[in-house]
Amino acid sequence: MTGVINPNVRQNKAVQLDDGVYWVGALDPGLRTFDIILSTANGTTYNAYLIEGSEGFAVVDTVKEEYADVFFSKLESVTDYSKIKYIVLNHLEPDHTGALPELLKRAPHAQVCISQRAQTMLKALLKTGLEDLSYTAVKTGDTLSLGDITLSFLNTPFLHWPDTQCTYLIEREILFSGDVFGCHFCDPRLFNDKVGDFRFSFDYYYAHIMRPFKQWVLEALDLIIPLSLKMIAPAHGPILRDRPRRYVTHYRELSTSSLSGKLGDDEKSLIIFYMSSYGNTARMAEAIYAGIDDVEGVRVSLYDLQGGETDPFVDLIEEADALMFGSPTINGDAVKPVWDLLSSLVVVNLKGKLGAAFGSYGWSGEAVGMVEDRMRGLKMRVPTPGLRIKLIPTDEELEDCKLFGREIAGILVGKNQNRGKIIEMAEL
Amino acid sequence: MAKAKVTFQDIDLTVSVPVGTRVIELSEKIGSGIIYGCRECDCGTCMMEVTDGWNNLSNPTVLEDKVLKDNMAGRHQRLACQAQILGDCTVKPA
């Protein structure tokens, strides 16, 4: 193993990746939890890069603050600060900007280049001592010259913050991708053809960081795919120099719906999840299910939360067009399995999905309203007040459930009962 | 009290409201796809497109203007948590 570790990695010297391109990042092998939500079995790396042109240097990203010394030592092994012309920030999260305040002190003349959306965040992140900070906001297609080489920018927002961008070194065909194509995997051998098996870490990182932003990933890939790629240099984990395009293809696969191929062209997917204590909410769910099934163009699925686990349900929810949750009210609250599911959705994008709630209750029936509020909080739209039935549903009430199902399904397929209607606000 | 009609294009529903009502006060109740984040003119999540009657909404405040700019809003885009309905208009999620 020692044979493939460049001694510079540990000796605080820059590691050359290509002609005039250096890794000046830091290893953090002891990290086990990142950002509260991510675990990592063997740490991470904070990858920063130094690019040398005939007219000066550009730094791409920095490192977490506590690793600033390593970063500066590596920088100083190649150049002195007076030659740094640009500081490019692909992403402003503190693990990449921790050394920025100090870098700005050492290279005060350097021009900071950030995305358009990063402008307000930069000042909020770096609160002190930067009153005079000047920066250039760049967008897709903007370029920077370092004499014989050129950096070109790709605006790739929401991967995974609004500010994110990628930077492409045209002459060397290297993409500095920020968190995209990154992972928490620390291996001093640095390169994907030398490090250990990091497939799990790569997919895990995607699943927790990029997954809620699949649509933005696909838009970014549209910009990245036309590029010639000799190497992808992400902000965490192995540097992808061996067949980098494989990772681009893999990102596309991970970001593409697996359900769409199984549904008809205009067909929508609706999933009902329910939990029942005495079978009353279950009966409602079945009647709603039957009602929805009458509506053409909707593929409905029915799941009893008691018989499943959260993770596969999250996968189903991600691809559904509409979701219905049924919960009885117990002690004035929706039941725990419903909350467990509704609090496990941070990794998927629910924005704009149609939602509805229902449930049987004994006294006051708060669960339905609480679940509706939660769905709105998750940025779903909840067009119809939920259906609550006191204790055991009668045949008539089960008929109401069917109608409720049909109504929601109708809204989903655009059979809009409002069509052209005018109502008074007081009626709401 | 003067009234105005606001049409939510995505669900094809028109609501007659007292002049001065904010879009946020009714869009969720009727199930329009306009969605909200902070609800206080900071995040830009509730961006909507005004497809008709652009001049019949209250002028953006300095703060809304800033959020619109930060979020690269188009010319006829507004924040639903801020815009007040002053006359007939049509809106939809941006």
Image (cartoon, coloured by chain):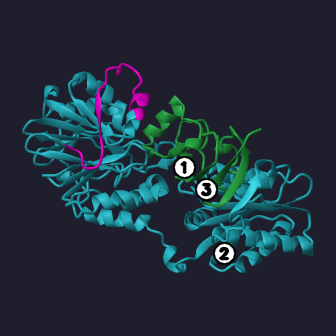
Chain colours: A cyan, B green
| Residues tagged by mark 2 and mark 1 found on one chain of the structure | no
Task: Relative to A89, say whether A425 is above or below.
Answer: below
**Residue A225 vs residue A314, the one in the foreground:** A225
* Label ID, residue A247: none
> Which of the marked residues, 1 or 3, is nearer the chain's N terminus?
3
Give A138 or A43, whichever is nearer the viewer. A138
Q: CA distance from mark 1 to mark 3?
A: 14 Å
Mark 2 is on which residue type? Val
* Front: mark 2 or 3: 3
Residue at the spot 87% in from the left edge and 66% down from the top edge? A278
- The magenta stretch is A120-143
Cβ atoms under marks 2 and 3 closer than 8 Å: no
Label 3 Cα crowd, 10 Å radius (few <14 / some 14-19 / many 20+): many
Q: Amino acid at mark 3?
A: Gly
Which residue lies under the disc numbered 1?
B50
Q: Is residue A5 magenta?
A: no
**Distance from Cα at disc 2 to Cα at disc 3:** 21 Å
Q: Is residue A36 left or right of residue A72?
A: right
Give the numbered dot on residue A300.
2
Residue at the disc numbered 3: B33
Which residue does the image show at 52% across and 52% down from the upper left?
Answer: B94
Q: Quadrant of residue A146?
A: top left
